[in-house]
Amino acid sequence: MGKESDEVILLDYWPSMYGMRLRVALAEKEVKYEFKEEVVGGVKSPLLLKMNPIHKKIPVLIHNGNPVCESLIAVEYIDEVWKDKAPFLPSDPYQRAQARFWADYIDKKLYAPGRKTWDAIGKEEEGKKELIESLKVLELEALGDKPYFGGESFGFVDIALIGFYSWFYTFETFGNFNMEAECPKLIAWGNRCMQRESVSKSLADPHKIYELILTYRKHLGLE
Amino acid sequence: MGKESDEVILLDYWPSMYGMRLRVALAEKEVKYEFKEEVVGGVKSPLLLKMNPIHKKIPVLIHNGNPVCESLIAVEYIDEVWKDKAPFLPSDPYQRAQARFWADYIDKKLYAPGRKTWDAIGKEEEGKKELIESLKVLELEALGDKPYFGGESFGFVDIALIGFYSWFYTFETFGNFNMEAECPKLIAWGNRCMQRESVSKSLADPHKIYELILTYRKHLGLE
């Protein structure tokens, strides 16, 4: 269904773990696209507001003029349109449901605790505890000893989680803990994913993310 | 893939709008299943805790011993396993993404404001405003003048929303507003869905839900 002549545009914001999902997914499918930075200085562009009037959030994938919003939905869309290459979801319905379950778990359980570690609301310790708890569930229940979440090949849950990996440095620095000591298999998984060009070229630099948050905290008078 | 000999069990709680999704989905596919009430007097059963150890929530669909958790994921699972009958999702990837977008919108935007209308935390007015706002977006942006959300046939978004319809009486009574005056097309849609046996036989009685909430509020000394 995906064609060479397709126009693919990604409305994104460079440090977004959700935007990174779409960058990785498009890279895995070898789809050429135009990256548009649509949040500058905290301000959302008119194009973003027009393309996602309901939630007003990046990322938005625009395929031949049609916007697809919400990152996991867009990743599934990419998988369905460019279906001949590197399938993200397995074909078995039960395994598909399991993959969707863990991707949904990531959406529900990581952002809020991760944010508490750095958002200067005095909840660093609480955020750290909740984040480690959620990550350990992922590590023990979903990843285990497999190379990727779906088994031997990189797939849907890996794509859902990988953007958070580039935030780990920020979480552990402000939350004052060592991610590798807490979740060694998850770190090994992240390093394994980084061997893929689709990932290493799509993820934001962890130190740049840290700098962004440091600036934010300085602005609030906290550093 | 679904066979006559399949063992299908639904762990549920009768007033749950999420459980109702699975009841309707299984009825649409004409799948026979065993309904198990797993929340009694506010207490969750050992079977539920065993089958959904991560979230500890109903509904859980157990198909030949394998649990599928999270209601929208289970509805997609049902659609994929019993795929020959009454497809819930369209085949076109963009329309599938749109359906998933609105189902996700329902998950994100209805429960919390609906609960505020009756949960005796002094936020009835706020809940009413937010709920009407979210429902109007659904009515105007997603339903429009179509008979069902997906067009001519009953599908994924209808299944996602229909459980809330049986809570409308509770929302409007405690929130002190008239749902039909606010969202006439949505009420017409709900009445249309109720013409289907899959829906009318699966939904909880709105007055029983109201009685349940009334008892809850009396227990708190509010009525």
Image: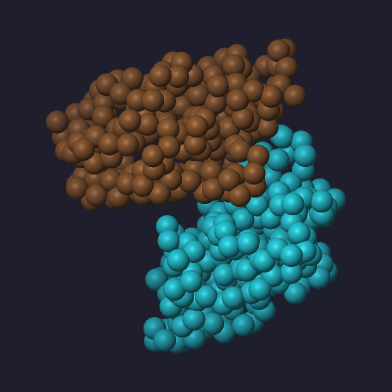
Chain colours: A cyan, B brown
Tell how many labels: 0
- Figure check: A176 above or below A208: above
Q: Nearer the viewer, residue A125 or A143?
A: A143
> How far across and down, in percent of the image, does residue A33 sit?
69, 70
Please say whether residue A15 is visible from this viewpoint: yes
The residue shown at (52%, 66%) is: A58
Among the 4 quarters of the image, the one containing residue B32: top right
> How far across and down, in percent of the image, does residue A167 sit?
61, 71
The residue shown at (61%, 30%) is: B87
- Figure check: B75 above or below A197: above
> How far across and down, in percent of the image, does residue A174 sit?
54, 75
The residue shown at (76%, 72%) is: A200
The residue shown at (51%, 23%) is: B23
- Quarter of the image containing the C terminus of chain B? top left
Please say whether residue A139 is visible from this viewpoint: no
- Quarter of the image containing the N terminus of chain B? top right
Among the 4 quarters of the image, the one containing residue A204: bottom right
